[in-house]
Image: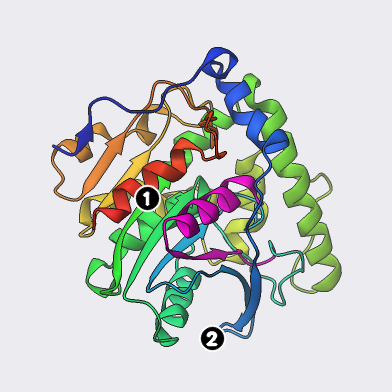
Amino acid sequence: MPIIPTSSYQAAGIFRNAHANTIYPAFFRKVEGVAYERERIETPDGDFLDLDWSKVGSRSLLIALHGLEGSAYRHYILGMMRYFNDQGWDGLGLNFRGCSGEPNRLLRSYHIGETEDLKWVIQHALRTGKYERIGLVGYSLGGNVVLKYLGEDPGQVADEVVGGVAFSVPCDVKSANTEIDRWHNWHYRKRFLDDLNRKMEEKAARFPHQLHLPAQMPRDFREFDDQFTAPIHGFDSAEHYWTSSSAIHYIPDIEHPALLVSAADDSFLSPPCYPFELAKAHEYFHLEVPRYGGHVGFVTRHPQGYYWTEQRAYEFLGAY
């Protein structure tokens, strides 16, 4: 039943082209007015997480999760922070390990199915005693983390968590990786892998006895995940990592309101990443598929610079 039959997102002109909608905000959107306060917290395994807070003195908190090789300073996180601040919520941008501007201490890093750090951050926020409700928003990789967190052990989700919203999510990781290997995505794939390979070269220099570089660095995500992600994080192979981490397998067990928004023209996503049948039979999981939007795009013309994604996330979470 919870399929949103008609999305309120409308794309104009050139932004009906998926690549224009994807690329434009990444390079040209500027978000002003967010003043972060950084906090570093220690993790149980001896590493650290850098959190960027944007506070207005609220009892409600938004925790926002970025995408692959992003950070809390990406335009889409800043925009979400600003909008929720303007509606009277505090905001917390979670920088995944190694994404805050400083390498993390350990060989391990983050990945698309890593939820333990999110759990730790939620506990940390609640230990402050300031928050009565927490909403979660994630983009792309971060959206997969949000959905997996809500579904992998629903009985352990903190009572204060009212729900989550996820945008542009490759929730079936294996088929999405096949999709991003297509020719029209070569420039995105190259940019991601250039960044990821550089990080592995840096890791190999710091951990020479634990990490060995191949003669040729990975050229696609299967090679990268087989060579690095899987063995570093305890998976048998890329296939094992993808299957274990895909939110699509955890969505059926979600017991908190959750909204997945992925544009129909998102060039990163495969058909299995649009779980219509799951949504039809689900009490809590909502699916919205705008015709346009690209990948983490959804360019919006608004006098205050707000994007539709920010308004949509607030509309959904604010209802709870």
**Residue at horizontal 65%, vertical 20%?**
183
Res 41 → quadrant: bottom right
Q: Nearer the viewer, mark 1 or mark 2?
A: 1
**Residue at horizontal 49%, vertical 27%?**
293
In the foreground, 164 or 215:
164
- Please indicate whether residue 133 sits to the left or right of residue 197 in the image: left
Q: Position of residue 16 (x, y in %)?
A: 52, 16
Q: Amino acid at mark 1?
A: Tyr
Label ID, residue 44: 2
Highlighted range, magenta = 74-98
Q: Amino acid at mark 2?
A: Pro
Res 209 → quadrant: bottom right
Query: What SS does tag 1 mark?
Result: helix
- Please indicate whether residue 195 sits to the left or right of residue 161 in the image: right
The answer to whether any part of residue 293 appears in the image is yes
CA neighbours of label 2 inside 10 A, class few (<14), some (14 to 19), many (20+): few
